[in-house]
Amino acid sequence: MKTTRNTAAKMAVLEVFEKSKTALSHTEIHKQLNDLCDRVTIYRILDRLINEDVIHKISNLDGTVKYAKCNHSHQRVHIHNHAHFSCENCHEITCLENVKPSYIMPHNYKVNEINFTLSGLCPNCLNSNI
Amino acid sequence: MKTTRNTAAKMAVLEVFEKSKTALSHTEIHKQLNDLCDRVTIYRILDRLINEDVIHKISNLDGTVKYAKCNHSHQRVHIHNHAHFSCENCHEITCLENVKPSYIMPHNYKVNEINFTLSGLCPNCLNSNI
DNA sequence: AATTAAACGCAACAATGTTGCAATTGATAA
DNA sequence: TTATCAATTGCAACATTGTTGCGTTTAATT
Ligand SMILES: [Mn+2]
Ligand SMILES: [Mn+2]
Ligand SMILES: [Zn+2]
Ligand SMILES: [Zn+2]
C-alpha cells in the first residue's frame, strides 16, 4: 500500500488547477509555477493526481494534451464520460460536464474509458466573430 | 488552385492503407514502406491525404496518433463522426463506422469536428481472456 | 529525533513532429 | 516528344513532449 505525500510542488499544482476555469497543459502549469520545481516533477505529479482520480487527462485532435480537475465528489472509481470542447481559435479546452454522449456498442467489446472531444468555436470566439 | 500529384510515395502510402484493417501510426507506415521515402515525406503525405479527405486522423487517450482510410464514398465535405476503438492490450485502433454518438450541445458553441474514442478490450483480446 | 519510503533534481535519452532550402519529378502545354 | 514549372522530396537541423536512472532530499510516522 503506497502512501501518497502532500508535497509543496503537488500543492502548488493543485492550486493552479483550482484557479483555472479551463484545462491546462503541462507547459502551462510549468510556466505558472515559475520554476518552483523541475518539469519532470510536474509530469510525475500529474501522473499521481490522475491515479488518485483528482484530475483527468484530455487528449485533443491536434495532438495537444491537457489536464483538468475532476469535479465529481471524489468517488473512487468513475469514468470521465463527459465531453470536452477545444476552441480552434483561442485553443482553450473546457470540460462540458453536462454533455455526455450516448451510443450503442457491439456487444463483443469491453469499454473501460471514453474520450469525447469536440472542436470548433467557443462562445467567446463565436461572439467576437472573426 | 493547387494541384495535387500522385507520386510514387503517395501511392505506396495509399496501398499500405488499403491493406490494413486497422488504423496506422506514422511509424508503422514508415516501417512498412521500408525506406522507400524519408519520414518527413510521410508526414507531408499524411497531411495532404487528410486535406483531400482520403484519410482521417485519430488521436488516442494515451497520446498516440493514428490514421485511417475514410470509407464514405468520397463526399467532399463530411464530418468523421464515427467512434474509434483502441485496445489496451493489443493497441490496435479500429474505426467503428456504425457507432455514432448522440449528444446535446449548449447552443452557443459551433462544433466543426468531433473525436470520439473508446478504449478497453477488443473482441480478439476479450476472447483470449488475459 | 530517528527512520524510511516517497518524492525530488538533474542529466541524458527517445519519440514525434516541424521548418528551410536545394534538388527532383509529375503533369501539363507546346 | 520535349520543355516547363510548381508540387514534391531528401536532408539536416531544430523544437517539443515525455521517459528513465540515480543519488539526494523530505514528508510522515514511530
Ligand atoms: Mn473534463
Ligand atoms: Mn475512423
Ligand atoms: Zn475560443
Ligand atoms: Zn486487442
Image (cartoon, coloured by chain):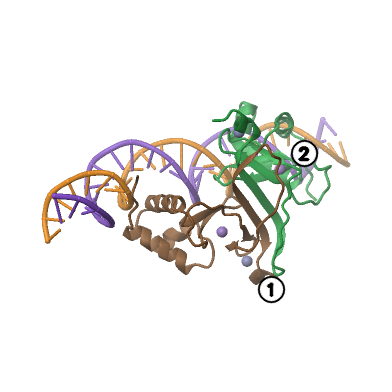
Chain colours: A green, B brown, C purple, D orange
Q: Residue pushed farthest bottom?
A: B128
Q: Quadrant of ligand 4?
A: bottom right
Quarter that holds the C terminus of chain A: top right
Q: Which residue is mark 1?
A: B127
From the top left corner, tell me how far across and down residue B112 is, in percent.
58, 45
Q: For residue A5, which quarter of the picture?
A: top right
* Label 1 crowd (10 A; few <14 / some 14-19 / many >=20): few
Foreground pick, B54 / A15: B54
Image quarter of residue A28: top right
Badge 2 sits on which subunit? A
| Element carrying mark 1 | helix
| Residue at mark 2 to residue at mark 1: CA–CA distance | 40 Å
Percent position of residue A84, x then y: 67, 43
Name the residue at 70% across, 32% down. A21
Examine the rendered structure and indicate whether residue B30 appears above or below residue B113.
Answer: below
The answer to whether residue B34 of the structure is visible from this angle is: no
Tell me: A22 left or right of D28. Answer: left
Residue D14 on image: x %, y % = 40, 36
Q: Amino acid at mark 1?
A: Asn
Viewer-closest of A10 and D2: D2
Q: Is residue A50 left or right of residue B23?
A: right
* Disc 2 residue crowd, few under 14, some 14–19, many 20+, Cα 10 Å: few
Give the residue at mark 2.
Answer: A5
Q: Residue at x 37, y 52 (%)?
A: B41
Tell me residue B2's x, y (percent).
34, 46
Q: Is residue A34 visible?
A: yes
Chain of the residue on which disc 1 is drawn = B
In this rendering, the answer to whether C6 lies above or below B74 is: above
What label sits on residue A6 in the rendered view? none
A115 and B56: which is toward the camera = B56
Quarter residue C9 falls in:
top right
Residue type of the residue flagged with mark 2: Arg
